[in-house]
Image (spheres, rainbow, N blue to C red):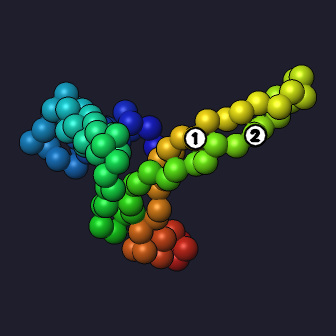
Amino acid sequence: MTKSALIEKLSENIESLTKKQTEVVVDTVFESIKNALTKGEKVEIRGFGNFKLRSRKARKARNPKTGESVEVPPKKVPYFKVGKELREMINRG
């Protein structure tokens, strides 16, 4: 499902909001999640899942083109863990 499809679905279900208003709501939710992750906070949506950051250590990798060894710096990557309710719903159907 794309962001535009999500906006379309929400605007159909919530008749009191226009598509433009629904787009603002969706954008606000996504921005809030991004801002929380940027601050290093965990985002928990009950019944859906958790977004959090994982730290990756520095490591040595190999450039596949040249075969040369390359140093990869440490970094943080976003991670999503599926909630129990969503996992059960997916596995049922």
Q: Is residue 21 left or right of residue 2?
A: left
Q: Is residue 34 visible?
A: yes
| Residue in the image at 51% along x and 45% along y | 77
Outermost residue on the right side: it is: 67
Circle 2 residue: 60
Q: Is residue 16 above or below residue 67?
A: below
List x then y, in percent, for residue 75. 54, 40
| Residue in the image at 39% along x and 62% along y | 49
User: Badge 2 local density, few (<14 within 10 Å), some, or many (20+)?
Assistant: few
Q: Give SS at disc 2.
A: strand
Can you tell which quarter of the image residue 16 is in?
top left
| Residue contact at pointers 1 and 2, CB within 8 angstroms | no
| Residue in the image at 52% along x and 50% along y | 55
Q: Amino acid at mark 2?
A: Lys
Circle 1 residue: 74
Real-space Cα separation, disc 1 to disc 2, in angstroms: 11 Å
List x then y, in percent, for residue 23. 24, 32
Q: Is residue 6 left or right of residue 1?
A: left
Q: Give SS at disc 1.
A: loop
